[in-house]
Amino acid sequence: MQTFIILVSSTPLAPANGLKAIKFAHAALSSGHKVHSVFFLGDGVYHGNGLTLTPSDETPLLPAWRQLQQEFSIPLINCATAAARRGVLAAIEAQEHGLTANLDEAFTAGGLVELVKGISQSDRVVRF
């Protein structure tokens, strides 16, 4: 049994890589492997934007991320620095600046500590 940490740095505006990451997680779990966490960095933090509306002819990724988190209790960690630079704010950051939070409730804000910890506790890093 392998333990994976999944890194998502691609934007959900080009949903192919996000969908591949979700499918990879499901395939790994159904094969008896473990997914330590999914860490979103760079433009990947947009996956956690709870205000995103998906056009009807595209696959909505946010509900799939929510389902993955709820069904398997996999932490979905948004890089707080990258997210703040892109306007994806957790409740505490939004409150500090008098803004409205838009980080989806299935996601948590984190940083390099969570990334390094996840890498050290995983056998493989898979990046999308």
Image (spheres, rainbow, N blue to C red):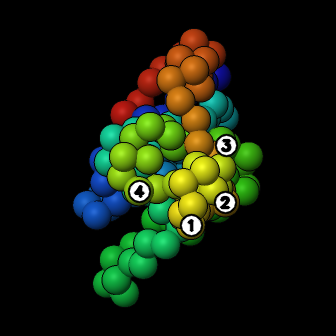
Task: Say if 10 sits above or below 110 in the image.
Answer: below
Tag 2: amino acid: Glu
Q: Nearer the viewer, mark 4 or mark 3?
A: 4
Q: Which residue is mark 1?
A: 100
Seen in the image, is 22 located left or right of residue 90? left
Q: Of label 2 and label 3, which has the lower sequence position? A: 3
How many angstroms separate mark 1 from mark 4 (CA)?
A: 10 Å
Q: Are marks 2 and 3 in contact (CB under 8 Å)?
A: no
Q: Nearer the viewer, mark 3 or mark 1?
A: 1
Tag 3: amino acid: Ile
**Which quadrant of the figure has residue 105?**
bottom right
Tag 4: amino acid: Gly
Q: Position of residue 110 (x, y in %)?
A: 58, 35
**Which quadrant of the figure has residue 102?**
bottom right
Q: Of label 1 and label 2, which has the lower sequence position? A: 1
Tag 1: amino acid: Thr
How many angstroms separate mark 4 from mark 2 (CA)?
A: 16 Å
